[in-house]
Amino acid sequence: MAITTLSKVKTILQISDTSQDDLIEALIPLVEADFLMIRNKAFDTEYNEDTEEYDTIYPIGSELTAIRMIQYQMSNIKSQGVTSESLGDYSVSYDTSNLGNDYPKSISGGIKRYATFV
């Protein structure tokens, strides 16, 4: 399970259409990796006997921080430009190869507090 879901991102950011779904889906694992890099500590896990797998335990509040990171990246991508666009059944692709993890201190500072608390 990822740090957040498409549905939660769209609800929090008040996105009602599907035009940005692919972008959000692509950003979720990238933002989670950035979160871990900034946090500099792996997330805790616990064994789930029902699924016989380990589940990741995300600190309380980390999901909202991840959504803020997605929002930040989405605004940066819009300023970087579109790589392709279609009209029939509208589709758009963005260049995500140059996404940086240079987040504002209001975001990165919030992540660092999760390094010691779970």
Image (cartoon, rainbow, N blue to C red):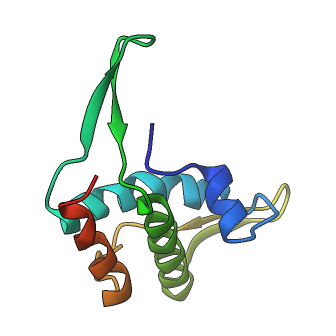
Against 15, is 54 above or below?
Answer: above
The residue drawn where x is 42% and y is 56% is 60
Rendering coords of residue 52 (x, y %): 36, 11
Which of the two residues, 70 or 88, is positioned nearer the viewer here?
70
Residue 87 shown left or right of residue 77 in the figure: right
Rendering coords of residue 75 (x, y %): 54, 83
| Residue 95 visible here | no
As drawn, the residue found furthest toward the right would be: 88
Which of the two residues, 91 or 2, is positioned nearer the viewer here?
2
Rendering coords of residue 99 (x, y %): 35, 73
Which of the two residues, 8 or 115, is positioned nearer the viewer here?
115
Asked where in the image residue 88 lies, by quadrant, the reply is bottom right
Rendering coords of residue 63 (x, y %): 47, 59
The residue drawn where x is 44% and y is 50% is 3
Against 14, is 2 above or below?
Answer: above
Asked where in the image residue 19 lies, by quadrant, the reply is bottom right
Against 55, is 26 above or below?
Answer: below
Residue 116 shown left or right of residue 103 in the figure: left
Q: Quadrant of the N terminus?
A: top left
Q: How many numbered marks does the figure carry?
A: 0
The residue drawn where x is 62% and y is 60% is 9
| Residue 32 visible here | yes
Residue 18 shown left or right of residue 24 in the figure: right
As drawn, the residue found furthest toward the left would be: 40
Residue 10 shown left or right of residue 27 in the figure: right
